[in-house]
Image (cartoon, coloured by chain):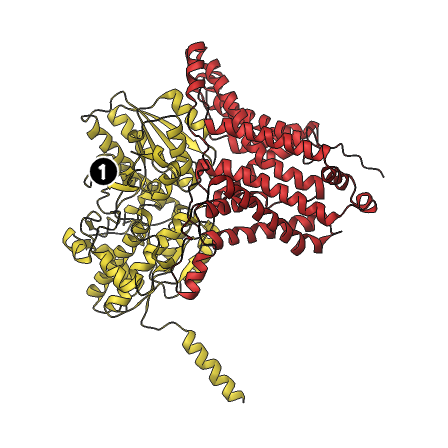
């Protein structure tokens, strides 16, 4: 009897244990809480791309990808708990939270796991000499600030002298990220910068928008997330601020942000580093192998939305890094160290994006030992309220390296000193 | 002169914002008055009510995600849209059913327990309703349009521009919120003063045991009070949800009601209104003054911003120093 029971337990354990050949890419997601609406779409895009690879190609290089999900609720403590709970055997983490990222940066250095934070997290992690395990390509917040100003320069014949620009920002580590860059850019281009913080969650912003109405800035930039975005766009419409002069960072550029304001949001602009909409060949495969077979995350209801597309794009970059790592290591069952090497040799060309089924979906990503952030290129999308869709209105634009490079060197050096990290050589 | 005009505009907008805070605070007061329970779930009630309203208006199938996941179906919508007025009435009906369920499943079993136990039960209720709302109606942000106008009032802007040379901003939604809040308070006061049920409610609020001894049903009163609080939550949910879309953050508006309650007292309907107005005006004027280079900048040599969240509590605490029971709260008499 005891033997039978032991056999049953052993069989059950063997069934429950993950297959050893799997590559584990945990999804630290948030589907609940104040930011759950955005987090759900991102997580769906992330899951669905790996499901597509598993279903269509049998994984990557013959290895299936396992994507265990852990709910962080956008809470830093829970995010760290999720990391600890899922790190065994994991290759790479993408927590979609700047707060969680800041906590994980020292941990991934010790545990030797890759941390991939596209478009969020610590900007100076672009410096691979200091942040060996962190990657933030294709763009970071400072790139975003610089591209926004570059776009405004283009709109004003290359001259922003005397213009007034207001930054409405989430009063948190995330929201404060672009301030230093914008201050430097203000000095360089002669515009006046007004910083207007909004306390989280941002449900009430009357004071901030009355100030904007009084100050009459020429442009408003926004670093918001969650309900702050919807309220800001509604308040901007309420005071009749010209929407075409209102530009949000990519985290303030989803359908969820503009829909509540209805027609009032028409013309609102946002930065993006990924394509939007369903007009890409990959969605044919996604429909055949994932959606129609009932394997889509949440039934596939968010496919093609701005945030879903960004989650999918994060998965694409990770998958390409895995592919490169397998190629470099000569084995399909790669380790996190090998994945880091794969990231550092990553070269996602426009041709490769087209092969994947995402032509012109993102900028070329070419990374190296010292450059973990890529080119930093981003483009502008504009909301069409009548059609209820985003239109891409510019090509990818490069940020101002002359301003950003010294800032990144300064900030990463400060981190290295604070954390006792010795810069590694990339020669 | 400009600063005076700007300050007046901020003051008026502060009053309007205060009304929005009062709408949330009213629900807390009603339940605390009748049962001595601080209802932690009041903010979530507003979220749940607004989610239900949008779901009914758009003919959304409740629990569609769950049904589709379990049975592999693809149902989303009944295929009809219900006019806002009927949808509001139906939602009010749902809130009554919810009140009955809360009374039967939670409160009835906790009669005679310490207030802290009842408070903890409402914390559990808040988490349950958050999850239930998500499962029933989905986690997406929903657009709520019951026909209330939004945006700057041209009449106010033009009139003030003619009078002062500067057009004031007042949001038409805030004007409507003020009118609706006034009607709601008048109805609540009339109900509690002039109806049998209202008098019974006040009797329960004064003394549970005495009310029971004269034949008043505690069970009925609790259901009635939770139903009314549910309706007040629906009104608050409509006002806030119209502005930001209906989403989880609506449940956090309760945080805005706390300083209002501390200031106005937990047992006074007029206190919730006056408290809301004081907090609204206080936090907006403080933010205006402290963030202005022409005011705080020239007076103190520095400016600070994003003060509203903490200043509301500081203001409430200042009042508490002088009146611990709040401005309109019942005087605390302890007999040894």
Q: Quadrant of residue B216?
A: top right
Q: Quadrant of residue B319?
A: top right
Q: Is residue B34 left or right of residue A41?
A: right
- Residue A114 visible in the current orientation: no
Residue at mark 1 = A399
Q: Is residue B195 left or right of residue B77?
A: right
The picture places residue A115, in percent across and down from the top left corner, at 34, 54
Q: Is residue B189 left or right of residue A139?
A: right
Tell me the yellow chain: A
Chain ID at mark 1: A
Residue A189, compared with residue B4, is above or below; it is below
The picture places residue B44, in percent across and down from the top left corner, at 55, 45
Residue at coordinates 35% horizontally, 26% vertically from top-left?
Answer: A241
- Residue A214 visible in the current orientation: yes
Residue at coordinates 65% horizontally, 56% vertically from top-left?
Answer: B105
Residue at coordinates 53% horizontally, 27% vertically from top-left?
Answer: B283
Residue placed most toward the observer, A312 or B168 = B168
The picture places residue A302, in percent across and down from the top left corner, at 34, 52
Residue placed most toward the observer, A56 or A200 = A56
Tell me the red chain: B
For the N terminus of chain A, the image quarter is: bottom right
* Number of disc labels: 1
- Label 1: state its secondary structure: loop
Q: Quadrant of residue B234?
A: top right
């Amino acid at each position: 009897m005891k033997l039978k029971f032991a056999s049953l337990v052993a069989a059950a354990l063997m069934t429950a244990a993950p297959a050893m050949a799997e590559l584990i890419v945990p999804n630290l997601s948030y589907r609940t809480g104040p930011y759950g609406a955005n987090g759900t779409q991102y997580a769906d895009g992330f899951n669905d791309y790996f499901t597509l690879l598993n279903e269509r190609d049998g994984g990557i290089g013959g290895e299936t990808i396992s994507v265990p999900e852990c709910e962080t609720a956008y809470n830093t403590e829970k995010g760290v708990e999720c990391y600890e709970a899922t790190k065994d055997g994991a290759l790479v983490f993408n927590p979609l939270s700047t707060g969680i990222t800041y906590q994980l940066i020292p941990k991934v250095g010790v545990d030797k796991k890759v941390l991939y934070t596209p478009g969020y997290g610590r900007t100076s992690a672009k410096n691979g000499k200091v942040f060996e395990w962190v990657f933030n390509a294709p763009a970071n917040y400072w790139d975003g600030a610089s591209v926004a100003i570059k776009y405004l320069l283009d709109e004003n014949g290359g001259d922003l002298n005397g213009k007034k620009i207001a930054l409405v920002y989430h009063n948190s580590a995330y929201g404060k990220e672009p301030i230093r860059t914008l201050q430097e850019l203000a000095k360089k281009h002669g515009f006046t910068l007004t910083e207007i913080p909004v306390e989280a969650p941002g449900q009430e912003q009357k004071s901030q928008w009355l100030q904007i109405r009084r100050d009459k800035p020429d442009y408003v930039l926004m670093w918001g997330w969650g309900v702050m975005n919807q309220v800001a766009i509604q308040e901007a419409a309420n005071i009749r601020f010209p929407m075409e002069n209102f530009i949000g960072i990519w985290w303030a550029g989803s359908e969820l942000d503009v829909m509540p304001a209805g027609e009032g949001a028409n013309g609102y602009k946002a930065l993006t580093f990924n394509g939007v909409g369903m007009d890409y060949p990959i969605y044919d495969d996604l429909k055949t192998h994932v959606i129609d077979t009932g394997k889509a995350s949440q039934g596939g209801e968010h496919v093609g939305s701005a945030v879903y597309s960004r989650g999918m794009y994060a998965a694409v970059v990770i998958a390409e890094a895995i592919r490169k790592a397998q190629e470099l290591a000569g084995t399909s069952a790669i380790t996190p160290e090998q994945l880091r090497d794969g990231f550092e040799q990553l070269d996602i060309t426009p041709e490769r994006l087209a092969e994947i089924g995402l032509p012109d979906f993102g900028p070329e990503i070419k990374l190296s030992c010292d450059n973990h952030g890529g080119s930093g290129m981003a483009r502008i999308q504009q909301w069409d309220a009548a059609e209820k869709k985003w239109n891409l209105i510019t090509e990818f634009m490069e940020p101002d390296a002359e301003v950003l490079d010294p800032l990144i060197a300064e900030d990463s050096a400060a981190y290295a000193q604070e954390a006792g990290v010795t810069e590694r050589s990339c020669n | 002169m400009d600063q005076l005009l700007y300050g007046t505009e901020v003051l008026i907008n502060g009053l309007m914002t205060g009304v929005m805070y009062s709408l949330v605070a009213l629900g807390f007061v009603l339940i605390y008055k009748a049962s001595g329970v601080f209802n932690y779930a009041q903010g979530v009630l507003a979220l749940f009510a607004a989610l239900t309203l949008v779901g009914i208006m758009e003919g959304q199938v409740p629990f569609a995600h769950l049904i589709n996941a379990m049975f592999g179906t693809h149902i989303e919508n009944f295929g009809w849209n219900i006019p806002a007025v009927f949808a509001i009435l139906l939602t009010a009906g749902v809130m009554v059913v919810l009140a009955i369920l809360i009374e039967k499943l939670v409160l009835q079993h906790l009669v005679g327990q310490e207030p802290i136990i009842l408070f903890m039960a409402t914390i559990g209720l808040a988490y349950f309703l958050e999850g239930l709302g998500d499962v029933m109606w989905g986690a997406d942000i929903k657009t709520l349009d019951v026909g209330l106008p939004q945006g700057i009032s041209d009449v106010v802007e033009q009139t003030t521009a003619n009078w002062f040379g500067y057009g004031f901003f007042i949001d038409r939604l805030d004007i409507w919120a003020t009118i609706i809040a006034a009607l709601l308070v008048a109805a609540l006061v009339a109900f509690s003063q002039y109806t049998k049920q209202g008098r019974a409610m006040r009797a329960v609020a004064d003394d549970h045991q005495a009310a029971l001894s004269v034949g008043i049903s505690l069970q009925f009163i609790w259901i009635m009070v939770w139903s009314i609080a549910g309706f007040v939550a629906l009104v608050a949910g409509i006002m806030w949800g119209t502005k930001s879309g209906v989403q989880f953050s609506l449940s956090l508006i309760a945080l805005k009601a706390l300083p209002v309650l501390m200031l106005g007292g937990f047992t006074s309907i007029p206190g919730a209104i006056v408290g809301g107005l004081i907090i609204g005006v206080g936090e907006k004027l403080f933010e205006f003054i402290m963030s202005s280079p022409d005011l705080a900048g020239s007076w103190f040599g520095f400016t600070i911003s994003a003060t509203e969240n903490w200043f509301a509590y500081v203001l409430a605490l200042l009042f508490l120093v002088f009146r611990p029971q709040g401005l309109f709260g019942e005087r605390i008499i302890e007999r040894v």
